Image (cartoon, rainbow, N blue to C red):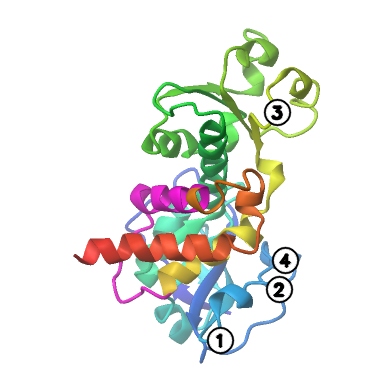
Amino acid sequence: MQVGKLSSRVGVVGVVGAAPLVLVVRGHAPPTPTPTARHGVDTSTWSGCLGPDLQVVHGTADLRQQTVLGVPQAVLTEALAGYLVDDGVDGDRVAEHVRLVTGRPVVTRTMARSIGLCAGAVLYLRSVRRSPAIARVLVAGADRGPGLAALLFACGLSDISLWNVSDERWLPLRTATRDVDVIIDLLGSPYMDQLRVDLAEGSVVAADDFDPDATLAPGILAGLAHNAARRTDFDHKLMRRCVDGLADGAERSGWPTAVTSPRVWAHLHDAVQTELTLRRL
């Protein structure tokens, strides 16, 4: 069922396909079907974080038709926050469309993953007493993490190298990892497997170590929804606050516990709430 018309104020040139969308609404919204792979994200465990007053509604942001599918208009207008599975689409552009429709912040899977990876880098550098200001970071598979370098920079890391598979001919990955303090791995197996034995223990922060849908998204969305009286964008300041919340909350346990422990939701919820409270002052 199509009910929400996406604004045409933002162009859709170069963007095709549709992106699964999860909206957080007040508990009185109509129930939605049990989450399946079709929705792109399993939210069956989110209730423990969102609480009894909030629930999720699944839909699809279709850029070709400029519509939101599967969400009744009444629910769409009452949304408190959104989560977009932006794999294979221009996440920033699609999220902007949804934000224009709902008037609420939209978090993408890419954003959530970037927060977790940045927290891992910060935690490792703290563990070896290395200042972020002088640390060297390599992002392996940088083209798979748009926006990650910008968030690393916002977190105080300025010496950032970006490496992609297409660079192997000119700069082998083994060479690129030399004299690097921490590596953020977006490639997964088999690229990093043989290199890990030559790298310092814990210096590789891998995207495959955690599921941002299950571990990070619920806490961020709960924080946004519980502070919905103030309309805001999910910007780099909020993302940086989330990184700090994760790193501070798991400084003793380290990576990847920082993004997999039961306390992750609370750390992120409190981080978002703290930032939004400070903006009211």
Give coordinates of residue 70: x percent, y percent.
58, 76
Callout 2 secondary element = loop
Q: Quadrant of residue 167?
A: top right
Q: Which residue is more in the foreground, 241 or 80?
A: 241
Cα separation, mark 2 vs mark 1, equals 18 Å
Q: Are marks 2 and 1 in contact (CB under 8 Å)?
A: no
Mark 3 burial class by Cα count in 10 Å: few <14, some 14-19, many 20+: few
Mark identifier at residue 38: 4
Find disc 1 in the rendering and name its residue.
Answer: 52
Viewer-nearest of discs 1 and 4: 1
Residue 189 falls inside the magenta stretch: no
> Which residue is identified by label 2?
35
Q: Is mark 4 on a helix, strand or loop?
A: helix
User: Mark 4: which amino acid?
Assistant: Arg
Mark found first going from the N terminus, 3 or 2:
2
Q: What stretch is highlighted in magenta?
A: 226-247
Q: Position of residue 44 (x, y in %)?
A: 69, 74
**Front residue of this view, candidates 233 and 216:** 216
Q: Name the residue under label 3.
A: 201
